[in-house]
Image (spheres, rainbow, N blue to C red):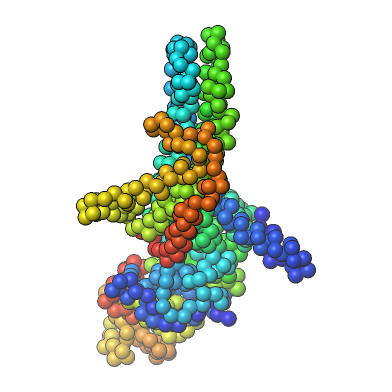
Amino acid sequence: MNTELRVVPESLTDSQTVAAAATSRTRPLFWSVRRELWENRSIWIAPLITAGVILFGFAIAAIDFPQRRRATLLLDPALQPARIQLPYDVAMYMIMLTALLLWLFYCLDALYGERRDRSILFWKSLPVSDLTTVLSKVTIPLVVLPLVAFVVTVATQAALLLISNLVLGMNGLSPATEAQLPLLRSWPSLLYAWIAMTVWDAPFYGWLLLVSASARRAPILWAVVPLVAIAAIERIVFQTNYFVSFLEYRSVGWAAAAFASRPHQYLRMIDLLSPLTPGRFLMNPDLWIGLLVTAGFLAAAVRLRRYRAPL
Amino acid sequence: MPCIEARGLHKTFGATIALDGIDLTVEEGRILGIVGPNGAGKSTALHAILGLIAYQGDLKVLGRDPRTERDLLMRDVAFIADVAVLPRWMRVSQMLDYVAGVHPRFDRAKAESFLAKTDVRRTHLIRELSKGMVAQLHLALVLAVDAKLLVLDEPTLGLDILARKKFYDSLLSDYFDHTRTIVVTTNQIDEIQDVLTDFIFVNRGRIVLECSMEAFASRYLEVMVHPDRLAAARTLQPIHERQVFGRAVLLFEHLGPEELAALGDVRTPSIADVFVAVMGGAAGEPQGAAR
């Protein structure tokens, strides 16, 4: 297991030496990400539980599902897709909400929990740099959580489709058409939406990781209270709400930048069927400013972890 | 190149001075015990050596600066900072996988063969293990690392006497081979007195006494004085006097056994006795010295 990382004899070619050096840099990162997944099993268990609850609820509601479908089909054809898509949208937003909660609690605990239980003293006894550790922790909200949420959403929607077609078929009704339920078209857009949301919202998890690296207690308060305080002071002193609008833009602004049109319906954040505008999204300077700020937060978190004592 | 070389090591926590100018050189192959009352700065010194805290002064460990090169340093340094810092949620098998994954000098087979001699099973969660078993697991991980320097900060705190004995026995039989260096702090100094090659006393962030065990035996002698020779013995300026079973035991520094033999039974004192004498009890006594 450790032989390939032993000092390489000088007779080896440069490329092998370079490869060995690269392995020795990426291996700690790879194992540290695995470690995060071992520790935080809720990252994939919680979305699965949400999916299970949705499917269970849908299966119970399937008793009068044929009746409801018949009623839907009597409506104006323009109103039918929204009705038919409703459970699929509910599934998507429920799993998204679960992922956002996980994301919040994961980031707040990532660099705080190891100081609270003193296990940081063990982690630091291993040849893993603070940078590698912080990168492994940022991989969870940046890569793992969006991917898990996307895969679970697709699986849940596919299962919903299977259950509803089964029930409809047994009751002599035809399955929803592609026009009524455009899942195959919306899944690539969903993946795109997850990627856009993740990179746009990066400053938030950078901020949460920074707070989690610095707080001596109650990181959630340190994360939230300053934002609330700024908003409240602005409201009282200037009677304006620019800061709240700013936070809102920084959290949901990606939807307007990454998609050609916003949905008409209330409560729906994104219209997955509207044309994607990745070019416009990538050209948006606010995206890059946000990523720069994130890098600053993470660099500060790395520095803080270097000398922060256990609690 | 010395294993550890510190010059004017300084560290303050707010208004508290934790390290007040520590100069220390530890050569390769030594086993150094750091002894001092609680809060003397022992752990702070070790944390500086391990690159866990910022400090002022010059410090080189295996030729590296621990402040900026901790991750590289840890390839050659193993440490147990405290008992019970192993993550409680982790499974023993995951622990072995992880350390084997990140540590280029970790010999997994060695760790597993060590664990095979204990009650620790690969399927155990660390939170299911007793304190003694956690210490054995930690020791198994550390002993399987081919390190040049091993740092132990109160490695047996809270363990019962059997577990402590097992810990140090394994350490000596499986690890120490005279090329490796060990630095250890403990309150149970008596238990490791025979293991050490050197020791230092630390108090209020300073080194109060620095002594090798070779020098110790000739430097300090303890005499259980015959009652009728007590007055004579006291004129020789003992550095400490205590009562054992109604007889006075006097501790002398820099006096030969031939001068003292006439006074009573001469023997080599324990480090703990010298500790009490040097610290004068003013700074508080370590648990091991409280008789």
- Tell me where residue B173 sits by quadrant: bottom right
Depth check: give the residue in front, A286 or A214.
A286
Q: Residue at x 47, y 48 (%)?
A: A200
Q: Residue B195's spot in the image, x, y percent?
A: 50, 71
For the N terminus of chain B, give its image quadrant: bottom right
Residue A113 against residue B52 in the figure, above or below: above
Residue at the farthest left position: A236
Depth check: give the residue in front, B196 or B80.
B80
- Tell me where residue B283 sits by quadrant: bottom left
Q: Is residue A86 visible?
A: yes
Depth check: give the residue in front, B145 or A253.
A253
Q: Residue B133's spot in the image, x, y percent?
A: 48, 51
Q: Is residue A137 visible?
A: no
Q: Residue at x 39, y 47 (%)?
A: A249
Q: Residue A18's spot in the image, x, y percent?
A: 70, 63
The image shows a total of numbered marks equal to: 0
Q: Residue at x 64, y 54 (%)?
A: B109
Q: Residue at x 65, y 60 (%)?
A: A22
Question: Residue B120 vs residue B85: left or right?
Answer: right
Q: Residue B136's spot in the image, x, y percent?
A: 50, 55
